[in-house]
Amino acid sequence: MRMESSVTELKGIGAKTEKLLNRIGVYTIQDILLYFPRDYIRYKAPVPPGAVLAEGVYAVTARVAGMPLLKHARGMDLVQAKAADETGAVECVWFRAAYVRSLLKAGQTYIFYGKAKQKGRGFCMEQPEIFTPAQYLEKQKTLQPVYARTEGLSNTVLVRTIRQALERIPLAYEFLPEPIRTEEKMCEYNFALRQIHFPDSIEHLAIARKRLVFDEFFLFILNVQRQKEQRTKLANDFPVQNETVIPYLLSHLPYRLTRAQKECLDEVICDLKRDTVMQRLIQGDVGSGKTVVAFLCMALMGENGYQSALMAPTEVLARQHYETFLKMCTDFKLDRKVVLLTGSLTARERRRAYEDMQLYPDAMVIGTQALIQEKAVFSNLALVVTDEQHRFGVRQRETLAEKGRFPHILVMSATPIPRTLAIIIYGDMDISVIDEVPAKRLPNKNCVVGTSYRRTAYEFIRKEVQKGHQAYVICPLVEQSEELEAENVTDYTKKLKEYYGEDIRVCCLNGKMKPAEKNRIMEEFAGGRIDVLVSTTVVEVGVNVPNATVMMVENAERFGLAQLHQLRGRVGRGEAQSYCIMVDHAQSKGSKQRLAILNRSNDGFLIAGEDLKLRGPGDFFGIRQSGDLAFALADVYQDADVLKRAAEAAGRLLEEDPALVREENRRIRELLCGEAERMSL
Ligand code: ADP
Ligand code: MG
């Protein structure tokens, strides 16, 4: 079996499972091995039978009372045993497993691990795993992977499949040149792959993760660097002759641009008039007003007879930008074609969009990834803007750029990365920073509370809704999960609907819904026909509903601070006072300390920095500072040191072998090409 072999070559992967795996982007053995856990759990501390007071997963330590019984019921063998001590007893059963009888000795102590269900007045564990106390002690050192799943695909199936893949592949090729690996004290690639899935210990996990994070950064930076070399100093084919539209629009905007917006706009216009093509990143905190800057630049292109494109990471956001642009064009009597192109358009709408892109050489085109699909042909593309860039790979940006004759590139990001890191990650670009938010806005009021505060929060939301405002409630999960104890939007929506009754319109939104469904709900929310939107983090990027004034986040302890900050940026966008209520379920010292940072500050840069200081190495479970940069494992904040080292190593490598032609670098070259292909789908 090779890395490129299909997953169907593994045992137990039928057509149905294959389909489910495809849905999470897994086709080959390599894909599944690179499908990293999103969390880990430990085997629980053992408890006596008397401590089993509610249904749930337990490790029960107890003696086997008497001989296990072999029974026949409903046509199958069934072994029954009683695990007991002086605190109480729990019944255990195993189906079709007569051999279990020979494993258990009467009077001996074991640990039974599994789910306890209510049965009569007591509890019963079905099919628990059996360990001796010594075995269990070893087990407790290991960490069990928890994978992000899709409906119908259980964690158990993923664990089994990955375990099998790891056993059956030959050793993977070590692509990192030996000198780099030694210098950076990185573990072997195969060791890293095994340990990231099934860590023997937390120490090994940390070592494995460091290696894989290094790889991710290293390849990413090599890509950026190579692109930079290939694309510098391209001639600007799109001379700007006419700038009058800018002062015209500025005088018609319902507000004045902030100083920072103005400076940024000037920098961009200056770039557009240069001899060479622009490549610029605009970094600005949430709510700093990046969209209008993009609009002005695109309007300028249109005025000069050129097309421009704005690419957003989600349908919801693309549609919202489209509506905003249309409205501005109408309000300002700007006669310009605005085209929407997303994945959920009907065949007819899409054909229309393609036609418009041919018919209007000065159109403003707004869309999602659909923009970079093969069939989307621009007739005169001069400027490409990507919004919330961190969601896209460098390669996607490039692919869109290739649709024109080397158009200008403008990237907008709200991720507050310190300048030193931004220079590495956006190595091929100039950087502008919008470092202030419009003055009229009131800063959000924040609070961190425990779950007992919920009623108060619900009543507070009711009052806001009565004043005509709206609210978001965020939960980490889509539906109930066996492994993770956290709120899910499905049950939460039901609960809130019951709580509020007819008075308040509650609706659910999550990433698993069909794009058209998500669009409809987001439009209803934006139109004020939904009062409370219970959602997963799909609303995190970019959406703008200025009438929403409350952001309530359940299980706030499970989110990275930068992510919480993004979420909170969804409110406080209008003139009314807005509020962010973070519900901390853990109430641990650590979570309190972290959330207190958010509570104190509304400044994205400061928050990311402070958060970093609080967390030590190896402290990376469940929480990713920003789940949104285009990396699978790496986190620019938390892994800032590794990022810097990877950048240096990449620099050294390119200095010695700029085209990566040496034999020992062959595999790296292949990987870079593979990556390029994968991302340009
Ligand atoms: P972000 O930078 O997060 O993308 P947006 O561009 O969505 O922010 O802007 C947030 C809100 O602020 C929008 O409703 C927009 O109309 C408004 N806005 C933008 N610039 C200004 C300004 N200079 N003064 C007042 N409001 C502004
Ligand atoms: Mg935005």
Image: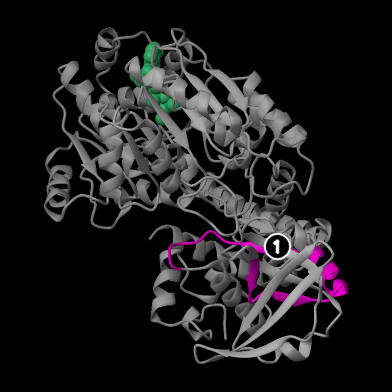
Q: Nearer the viewer, residue 493 or 301?
A: 493
Image quadrant where one finds the C terminus: bottom left
Residue drawn at (20%, 38%) of the image: 339
Picture residue at 19% right of the left edge, 16% below the top: 332
Residue range in magenta is 123-152
How has the structure been colored for display?
one colour
71 left or right of 349 in image: right
Q: Quadrant of the N terminus?
A: bottom right
Ligand 1, what quadrant?
top left
Quarter assignment of residue 196: bottom right
Q: Is residue 28 above or below residue 116?
A: below
The amino acid sitting under disc 1 is: Tyr
Q: Residue at (55%, 39%) from the top-left corner?
A: 426
Magenta residue check for 150: yes
Please, what secondary structure does the residue beneath circle 1 have? strand
Q: Residue 325's image quarter?
A: top left
> Is residue 172 rendered magenta in the image?
no
Q: Is residue 165 left or right of residue 6?
A: right
Residue 20 visible within the image: yes
Residue 74 horizontal/vertical position (percent): 49, 88
Q: Nearer the viewer, residue 557 or 75?
A: 75
* Image location (x, y in percent) of residue 343: 27, 51
Q: How many marks?
A: 1
Q: Nearer the viewer, residue 381 or 328?
A: 328
Residue indicated by mark 1: 58
Classify mark 1: residues with Cα within 10 Å, few (<14), some (14-19) or many (20+). many
- Horizontally, residue 678 falls left or right of residue 376, namely right
Q: Is residue 180 visible?
A: no
